[in-house]
Structures are given as structure tokens and as C-alpha cells.
Image: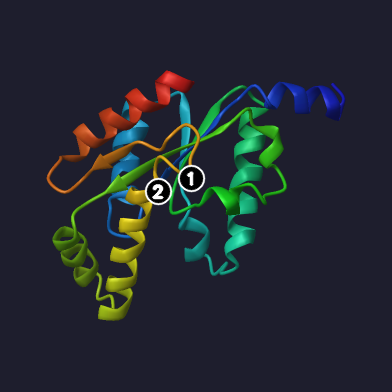
Amino acid sequence: MNNENKSMMVQQIPLFIVTGSSGSGKTYVISELRKILPGFDIFDIDNLRELGITDEQQIRNVWLRVARNIAESGRMTIICGTAMTWDIEKCIDYSFFRHVYYLNLHCDDETREKRLRERNWPEEMIQEYKTFAKWLCENADKEYNPPMPIVDTTTANVADVAAQIKKWVLQYA
């Protein structure tokens, strides 16, 4: 199969991104998602940071390349991690996907503060991420097409959050 035919095949596969401000539960939900969506490959965007890769665009490019290779096998990918549309659209492999869908995990400010303080985050960063979380919610229906759904993780257990994500994914899969 030549590259043009491969490209056409991959463009039929959507990509899913579970985003949200730090402390919203993106990493926490991954193992549950893997249990209830065994036909999907699910990754934590932060795994590359743990290897010492710090260039944010490089990280996004690597994950979209991984997702593209998975799509060439007919499987779909969910990437969990903070990612904005305008950054994903700059990725080399962006055009290989039929569409990139986003879902925002969100929690209230008090819960976010508690979760980030447990990670020993400095106060200034906690405040920045609270502001970012607010921006995501305010722009979920303006900056995203279709509008980005918001799943509140403040009091929901991980199984409920994963079930909501599964329902969202399956409507576009």
C-alpha cells in the first residue's frame, strides 16, 4: 500500500484527547479507561516528560505519530493530558486524523488546590492552573468543534468518570 492510500485510510480514524487543567484527574482515570475500553490504546501525555523530554511541541508530535501508527492498524487512541487545539493542529501528523475530539476533566477550585498541594506545587502555579481551568470551562463551546464536554471530577468516583468518557468516545468512534 503506498503512502497516499495509507494516509486516506488513517484519515477515517478519529483521535480523542482527554484534557484538563492539572489536578483534574487525567492520569488517575487512565487505568479505568483501559479496563472499559480494551479496543483503544490509551496514553498519558506526561510519560514522555518523565523520560526527560521537555519540548512541549516535540511531545505532542511524538504522541500524534504514535496515534497515527496505531490508526494504521485500524485502532483508535485516547491521549490523556493537557493539550490545546492550536498546538495539536501544528503537529506533523494532525492531518492524518478524520477529526480530533476533546473532553475536559474539571474539578472545583478547592479540590484542585488540595490535589496540587498534595503534590507540593508552589502557590503561584496552583493559582495559574485554577485560572487555566476556568478558561477551559468558559471556552469549551467557543474554541472547540464540536463543543468540548466537561466532566466534573470533584466528587465523582473514577469508574463514573471513565464511564462518561467511554460514552463520549463511542458516540464518535
- Residue 142 lies, in percent from the top left, at 45, 43
Q: Is residue 146 left or right of residue 134?
A: right
- Per the image, label 1 sits on a secondary structure element best described as loop
Above-or-below relation of 108 to 42: below
Which amino acid lies under the numbered mark 2 shown in the image of this protein? Answer: Asn
Q: Mark 1 = which residue?
A: 143
Mark 2 surroundings: few (<14), some (14-19) or many (≥20) residues within 10 A: few
Side of 135 relative to 119 (left or right): right
Q: Amino acid at mark 1?
A: Glu
Q: Are marks 2 and 1 in contact (CB under 8 Å)?
A: yes
Question: Residue 104: image x %, image y %?
Answer: 36, 44
Q: Is residue 115 above or below residue 152?
A: below
Residue assigned mark 2: 139
Query: Residue 117 location, x and y as percent?
Result: 20, 72
Q: Quadrant of residue 166?
A: top left
Between 121 and 88, the residue placed more toward the observer is 88
